[in-house]
Image (cartoon, helix red, strand yellow):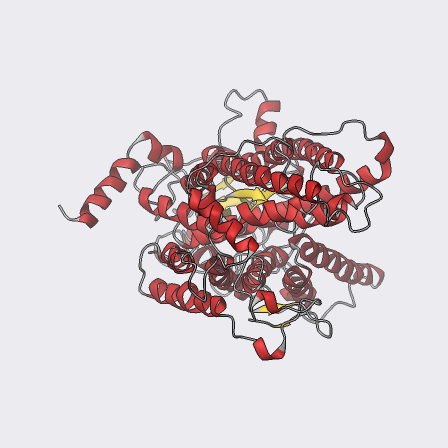
Amino acid sequence: MGYNEWVHNANMAVARSFVGRRFRLHGSGHPKERKGSYFFTEIRAGLATFFAMAYIISVNSTIVSESGGTCVCPPDSTDLCDSNPEYMLCVAEIKRDLVTATAAISALTSFCMGLFANMPIALAPGMGLNAYFAYTVVGYHGSGLVPYQVAITAVFVEGLVFVGLTILGMRQWLARAIPASIKLATGVGIGLYLTLIGLTYSAGIGAVTGASDTPIELAGCHQDNLTDAGVCPSWDKMRNPTMWLGIFCGGIFTVILMMYRVKGAIIIGILLVSIISWPRNTPVTYFPYTELGTSMFDFFKKVVTFHPIQKILTVQEWDVSSYGGQFALAFISFLYVDILDTTGTLYSMARFCGAIDERTQDFEGSAVAYLVDAFGISIGALFGCPPVTAFIESGAGISEGGATGLTAMTTGFCFFISIFFAPIFASIPPYATGCVLIIVGSLMAKSAADINWRYIGDAVPAFLTIAIMPFTYSIAYGLIAGIISYIILNTVVWLIEIATGGRIRPADKKYKDPWTWKIEGGILPPWLVRASKGKRDFWRPYDDIEHNVVPRSGSHAAAAPPTIPGTHFGPTDTIPLEGREYYSDGADADVGPDVGPALGVGVDSRGVNAHHDTTIATDHARSKAGKSGSRGDGHGGPSASTSRSTSEEGEKVKM
């Protein structure tokens, strides 16, 4: 028996087991098995995600420790205790605590996301949020709005509020309420955001940096040669050997492997760069002969060690009366940034792995996924960490073929191991993962083709969403810009139409993506609706019951609506079906007024609702459907106009 045959047999054996059905692996026989998901592919994908985000162990501990943690700097210090050896030793201890805390909370939340939500999405303390926490809320060495203990309390309370919002379905409703073009643009914006991270020094190859005359400029110099303004001198630009190591071994080599469908291409690239960078007597070493480099190398040589959390475990300060206004400001800031940031990331990653239901604009297990994230925030606060969030680096594992919770569980297990092997995992250099983030960003950018560029009222908000995310280093700000601009533009158009009785309207209005505040399924999550009706199986996961579809003749899934030749609705030939679903034999089933395409419209080639100015009577639709009910003719059964977002967005790089 050859190796490939053994792997195939093992994959099939796992798929047919309880594990396979629980996680809906390919070949499990589950009605909603996830095509192309195999056990060893999921394990490999989980490793890829871990290696892509392992930098968070060292980066988060470095950033948050800059706040000083629970260390107290005397108020009469003139340099914020930079020259106080006792204080700096305390900060070093805080950093070691944060290494353990970061790995532990990342392990717990990622494992739970995979186990309970069955999503290939890993969680960890969020980049950007940790910087806001350390440098704005607490401030450098405690010089900010509130002490570390009060800020951690704000994070803990925020997590509890998130739990309530999730139980009531507000976060899921928000994700469904966002206009279609902005949802698609979110994935593109996150891809550019990832690319920018991959180009920076802190978590990438160091090819760009900030500038005094322009927002950003070419870098590529040795980090030690950066000026006080953080700019590369002209004589050293693009001469950093570690950058070229990352480009050729972590980037070009990885892409070539992916072109030839080599399994584990991303992991191979990360490991290759890391191993090359570990010897000290090379120009690309990660451990230079400096005080910091020697300290890092001494830690690396320990290989196996465990450092218990001593100074930042459960240090919440519940008496916030002295910091009322500042506490409220910190709490609200964390809350709104996290709502938009995590919601946008979870939705985009779900779309990237093909888990989005184009009809409901929701993904399987969304309520559980949001709950895991919410509880993770509060538990992380007990560990002394800033808000935990879904990581966009999960796209690395999805690109490797990850499609189920086994991917996230593998990543979580790796983080658990890293608690004891922190010296190794904390020594993966940022230039080993930088090009991986760029590659994943390029894969996510393809959803730009599905954005509705034909109507400027949809195109401009989508473009602002894409552009603002990388340039403000914030997913939340990009979503805010897109949503607010969408509301303003389309509200003005609506008011003009009302005032003129519909006589004045944009020339291309027929191409507009329909939107309604009457979001399908309502605000309350389906499980809560079922529980309120006394259903004993209210806890069951997302399935056909939540679609309110009555299976017919043993059918478990409704097909796409039929099309009528010669009937044109803007960009499609799809019939608007008022609250109806059609089966492949041409028959229909009444699914109620709240189910079906929003506003009674069809689905166009981009996977979003088509123009709905024209209305066809349901009886006429039924009669036409009956005439075109034969399968395979392009009109009965599945629509001839296949959703590009389901065929392309759900596509993964198959290794």
Is 132 above or below relative to 309? below
Residue 150 placement (x, y as % from top left): 76, 34
The reply to whether residue 116 is visible in this rendering is yes
Is 155 above or below relative to 346? above
The reply to whether residue 567 is visible in this rendering is no
Quarter that holds the N terminus: top left
Q: State the residue lying farthest toward the bottom.
A: 235
Residue nearer the viewer, 518 or 482: 482
Q: State the residue lying farthest toward the left.
A: 1
Give the mark count.
Answer: 0
Residue 469 placement (x, y as % from top left): 65, 59
Quarter that holds the C terminus: bottom left
Q: Quadrant of residue 43?
A: top left
Residue appearing at x 45%, y 64% in the figure: 284
Q: Quadrant of residue 96?
A: top right
Residue appearing at x 76%, y 43% in the figure: 142
Residue nearer the viewer, 327 or 206: 206
Is 485 above or below relative to 103? below
Residue 352 placement (x, y as % from top left): 49, 53
Residue appearing at x 67%, y 69% in the figure: 227
Query: Does residue 586 appear left or right of residue 27 in this picture?
Result: right
Residue 422 placement (x, y as % from top left): 47, 42
Residue nearer the viewer, 158 or 467: 158
